[in-house]
Amino acid sequence: MTLTDTSATTTAFAPSVFETVESEVRSYCRAWPVVFEQARGSRLYDEDGRPFLDFFAGAGSLNYGHNNPVLKRALLDYLADDGVTHGLDMSTTAKRAFLETFRSVVLEPRALPYKVMFPGPTGTNAVEAALKLARKITGRETVVSFTNAFHGMSLGSLATTGNAAKRAGAGVPLPHVTRMPYDHYLDGRMPDFLWFERLLGDPGSGLDRPAAVIVETVQGEGGINVARAEWLRGLAELCRRHEMLLIVDDVQMGCGRTGEFFSFEEAGITPDIVCLSKSISGYGLPMALCLFRPELDQWQPGEHNGTFRGNNPAFVTATAALDTYWRDDALRDRTLGRAGRVEAALAELLGEDGRSGVAYRGRGLVWGLEFADGARAAAVCRRAFELGLLLETSGPRDEVVKLLPPLTATDDELDEGLGILARSVRHTADRRTG
């Protein structure tokens, strides 16, 4: 996202140490120029006690809200008992409890055979591990990704990312990746995968046989682009026929964001490799998983590692989150039910004023409101902040206002946030922005 510095209009904010010591690379603080001090549930509080309803949720890392009391209790008890904090890949009681719970609560009910790898603490670590494994297994170099994809900021992940501004930061070539059109990219003017299939079948196309295809079922940073279930099934079948591994990047859309625990469940597919991070710890603690079919587990000991892959406090909160929210279907059903509530609110908002936006789209509790340009979307987010709501933009031109509320937000909080969004859209329409 591109963030606009509004500090000039907020006289109470004088972030001298942030401006003089912290790097210019900082971004979110420019759009939200306050100093946050506390957080509970769906709200953040600045140091003056002003509350902000959070429809950003740590970029999807806080699906269960800030300082979730059940998860906090488990973490505090573990730390009070001098539980292991840093463990590399050593065996610990916290890791064992997580693996046993993940197997019984997530994998076995879905008949998923995956092995679990802890590649490092972030989403891009999981993606890097997936790409490395795919190339190791197949002996091929090329990976196929999609237009408007975002998979991370380290070099391998960045090579599969579409955004030009993010790619420019690499400073070096980003090779061995071929781009294909994502679902709806050509507005239905070409049959699904016609171009992809033609390149794969033509020895003169110049496309080296790919090791893998990496895809997001919903492109979050790319603008809340939602792939149809039939498109995902077609992609899985294409990968099977051409012996390409299918990698699903579920870093932001996993852990219930779209309703089911994994975002690909609706399509009825079983990827070869799955990347998880963000809300897998449940508490905002760094943690990532790379899941893959057992026959792909051909790593040599230590062949891929990381100092902080054994973040035991994250194992503790992840186990508590699975026990609390995924032993039944209550959270899933609640999320799917609220999707209709959000969609109805967005439809009403756009219907009342033709200038309000171009389109809306989403699944579960991730939604996007698309405007004609980034200036209008930024203005909406700026006004929402003034009214006490945190929103960010996404999309190739930052033209989409992104809604990412905690899955545990109350009905009243959801309605409050949607109401502030509506006021912000009307406010910018009145000023003929965009």
Image (spheres, rainbow, N blue to C red):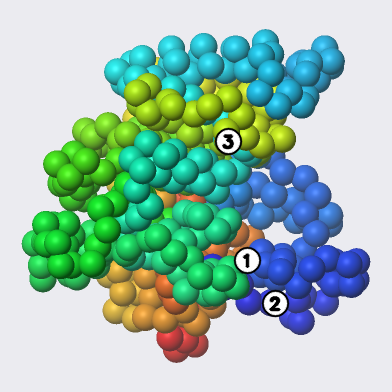
Q: Is residue 281 above or below residue 187?
A: above
Is residue 68 visible in this depiction of the protein? no
- Pointer 1 residue: 385
Q: Secondary structure beneath disc 1?
A: helix
Label 2: few (<14), some (14–19) or many (≥20) C-alpha neighbours in 10 Å: few
Amino acid at dot 1: Phe
Query: Which mark is first along the chain, 2 or 1?
Result: 2
Q: Is residue 238 left or right of residue 122?
A: left
84 left or right, relative to 60:
right
Viewer-closest of 276 and 310: 310
Mark 3 or mark 1: which is in front? 3
User: How far apart in space, not on screen, are marks 3 and 1 (Cα)?
Assistant: 42 Å
Q: Measure how far apart labels 1 and 2 are at the Cα level.
A: 10 Å
**Viewer-side residue, 349 vs 111:** 111
Locate residue 29, reporting x and y percent: 72, 65
For image coordinates 35% across by 55% down, the residue present is 142
Residue kind at label 2, given as amino acid type = Thr
Query: Which residue is disc 2 drawn over?
Result: 6
Quadrant of the rendered structure where residue 370 is? bottom left
Say above or below: 327 vs 387.
above
